[in-house]
Amino acid sequence: MTDLIQLLINGLAIGSVYALAAIGFVIVYSATGVVNFAAGQFVMFGTFAGVAMLLNAQLPWPVGYGAALLAMALFGALFFAVLYLPLRASPVVTIIIGTVAIGITMQNAALLAFGSWPFRLPSPLEGVNLTVAGATISAHAVAAVIVTALMVALLWLLFFRTSLGIGMRAVAQDIKAARLMGLKVNRLLALSWILAALLAGVAGLMLGPMWFADTSMGDPIALKAFAATIIGGFGSLPGAIVGGLFVGLSEVLGASYVSSAYKDLISFGIMILFLLVRPQGVFGERVQDRG
């Protein structure tokens, strides 16, 4: 039983990272109709922003985390201005290919800046453990779950209790109608990219102490986030959360009770099963034509 509790907490912690990446995926897709294939590299950049601020610059925790997230927000704005804005009138497939190209560029830029050696981002809760029903649980893993829950609550408040969020939802539903209603569409689209980058930054900072961070970590994260959106329901925020947690739990439990060699096979096997049986995912969002 104690082992199961530990595995469940670890699965929820890694699933929280996937969920945040998947939410960023969904926000960008809902607002722009574009599947951001650089989403995994966004998370990788978040982790290495933490490495730059906390390990290289030796900033204290609150300042380092704040600086890393500010850098990610600026990066999201730059991504919108440099890639999406010039290409927004192009076919969606062109923008998608652009995200793939930028993702590869980001990976190689990180390789040039930080090298190929892996880093381990220390946690403010390093060495702190909790005991639950006899199971020893990392405080960082618990914090990752709590932080994700807080982020989801803040997103709910943003989207359903602020004019800014309501405007973003309007743009996601019908961009032409939103423009006719006088909404500043470009500003709201830019905010979608910034929000996705910030969520990726939080995911990267949480993931750094759990994984050895290297410049190739973005690809598996992007695939897991994509699997989470398929399982939960493409375009659905609740689906992204549930899908991310499901992928994290299946990965950890599968590695423990089946074999670590098959943990990815289990996650992606379930994703393929959903594509065959229920392509709209758990939350039943209709599969869109674009993206």
Image (tube, rainbow, N blue to C red):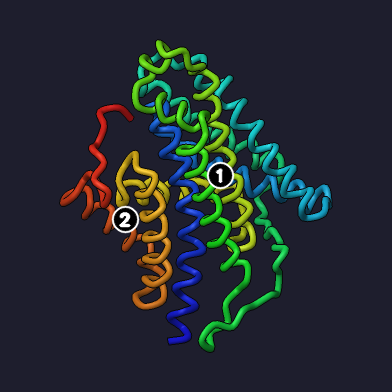
Secondary structure state at the residue bearing disc 1: helix
Separation of marks 1 and 2 at Cα, in angstroms: 22 Å
- Residue 110 percent across, percent down from the top left: 65, 40
Would residue 23 appear left or right of 284 to someone viewing this image?
Answer: right
The circle drawn on residue 159 is none
According to the picture, the residue beneath numbered tag 2 turns out to be: 268
Q: Are marks 1 and 2 in contact (CB under 8 Å)?
A: no
Quadrant in which the N terminus is drawn: bottom left
Q: Nearer the viewer, residue 255 or 15?
A: 15
285 versus 271 height, above or below: above
The amino acid at mark 2 is Phe
13 versus 184 height, above or below: below
Alpha-carbon neighbours of circle 2 within 10 Å: few (<14), some, or many (≥20)? some
Residue at position x 69%, y 75% in the image: 128
Quarter-wise, where is residue 96 in the image? top left
Quadrant in which the C terminus is drawn: top left
Q: Is residue 4 visible?
A: yes
Secondary structure state at the residue bearing disc 2: helix
Residue at position x 54%, y 41% in the image: 41
- Residue 190 percent across, percent down from the top left: 54, 25
Quarter-wise, where is residue 29 in the image? top left
According to the picture, the residue beneath numbered tag 1 turns out to be: 200
- Residue 222 percent across, percent down from the top left: 45, 46
Residue at position x 51%, y 64% in the image: 13
Quarter-wise, where is residue 75 in the image? top right
